[in-house]
Amino acid sequence: MLEAEALLGGHMDLGLKGKVAIVAASSKGMGKAAAMGLAAEGARVTMLARGETDLGNAAQEVRERWRAEVLAVPADVTRYDDVKRVVRETVARWGTVNILVSNAGGPPPGVFDDMDDARWQSAFELNLLSTVRLVREVLPHMRRAGGGAIINLQSISVKTPVDNLILSNSIRSGVIGLAKSLSLELAKDRIRVNNVLPGLIMTDRQRQMLTVWGQRLGKSFEETKRLREAEVPLGRIGDPEDVAGMIVFLASDRARYITGVTVQVDGGLVRSIM
Ligand SMILES: NC(=O)c1ccc[n+]([C@@H]2O[C@H](COP(=O)([O-])OP(=O)(O)OC[C@H]3O[C@@H](n4cnc5c(N)ncnc54)[C@H](OP(=O)(O)O)[C@@H]3O)[C@@H](O)[C@H]2O)c1
């Protein structure tokens, strides 16, 4: 099997050279891998996250790995002023926005009885309203550029509820509805809108989830990981690069006739036929 890194920087021209991409929540995990993947194809990338140090390091890594043009903007996607600033600084630097990868941290775990209104409101702001605002801010630039690609990173929880994640199971479906409506409304502007649903992907977030699961089951991290891997038909927890590959493809001209779709990248975990 290819090393995860080798999946980046392939030989098929994806038409991404010089394109301007904003990748939200990209100092770690799948956001960072998506920024790497787009940079590997020659895109200019704005990376953002709240923690400045991790963001600065991640941006530097992408720059050095691909001699890429990278702008790092510390920002919280739940703050509208931050979202506006990210888009403003991107356009000030490169003149436009061609690609948006909408991403954020995951909402906290828990069941219905754990959640008061404040938690529901925060999950709405983190995972749905952030997407609305990012899209609103990039739209004028994509329209002026004559097209664009929007990719929402969500979760397989929109296809099959994940235990103990009621906020994700509920709020993320709204993004899928939003994206489908947008794909119809924006098709005339040649702006494509698609969703990517990760299954089990080894990131900080997944390490935390495995730790919590392990504690509930009274098992070690390694044992819990093996149990989860056994649930995945392809037999392993995915790498962030596995998800980035789909994001890069959907952002590219190779996907120019694809809009309004929702694709899981989950090693076969979701059992539904559609
Ligand atoms: N890993 C999985 O198996 C899996 C599966 C399905 C869905 N997902 C979802 O996919 C998304 C990405 O997950 P991941 O596993 O790649 O996470 P991760 O490795 O924990 O990285 C999360 C990234 O998001 C940034 N971030 C978090 N909250 C933010 C905010 N309010 N504003 C801006 N940036 C923010 C973090 O940086 P700062 O904290 O410094 O801001 C970090 O760069 C999450 O929504 C997660 O729930 C993950």
Image (cartoon, rainbow, N blue to C red):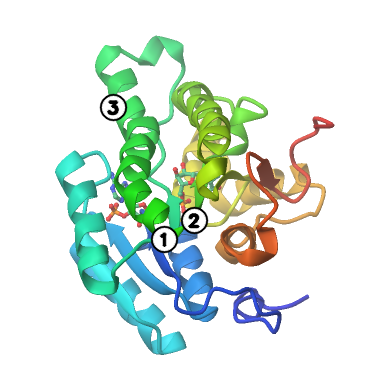
Which quadrant is home to the N terminus?
bottom right
Residue 102 is left or right of residue 75, and the answer is right
Nearer to us: label 1 or label 2: 1
Could you say which quadrant of the image residue 197 lies in? Answer: top right
Q: On the image, numbered disc 2 is attached to which residue?
A: 148
The crowding category of the residue bearing disc 2, from other C-alpha atoms within 10 Å (few below 14, some 14 to 19, many at least 20), is many
Of the pair 122 and 88, the residue shown nearer to us: 88
Q: Position of residue 80 (x, y in %)?
A: 20, 40
Real-space Cα separation, disc 1 to disc 2, in angstroms: 8 Å
Residue type indicated by callout 2: Gly
Real-space Cα separation, disc 1 to disc 3, in angstroms: 33 Å
Residue lying at 50% horizontally and 71% vertically, measured from the top left: 38
The crowding category of the residue bearing disc 3, from other C-alpha atoms within 10 Å (few below 14, some 14 to 19, many at least 20), is some
Q: On the image, numbered disc 3 is attached to which residue?
A: 122
Residue type indicated by callout 1: Ala
Residue type indicated by callout 3: Ser
**SS under mark 1:** helix
Q: Position of residue 113 (x, y in %)?
A: 41, 10
**SS under mark 2:** strand
Real-space Cα separation, disc 3 to disc 2, in angstroms: 29 Å
Residue lying at 47% horizontally and 38% vertically, measured from the top left: 212
Nearer to us: label 1 or label 3: 1
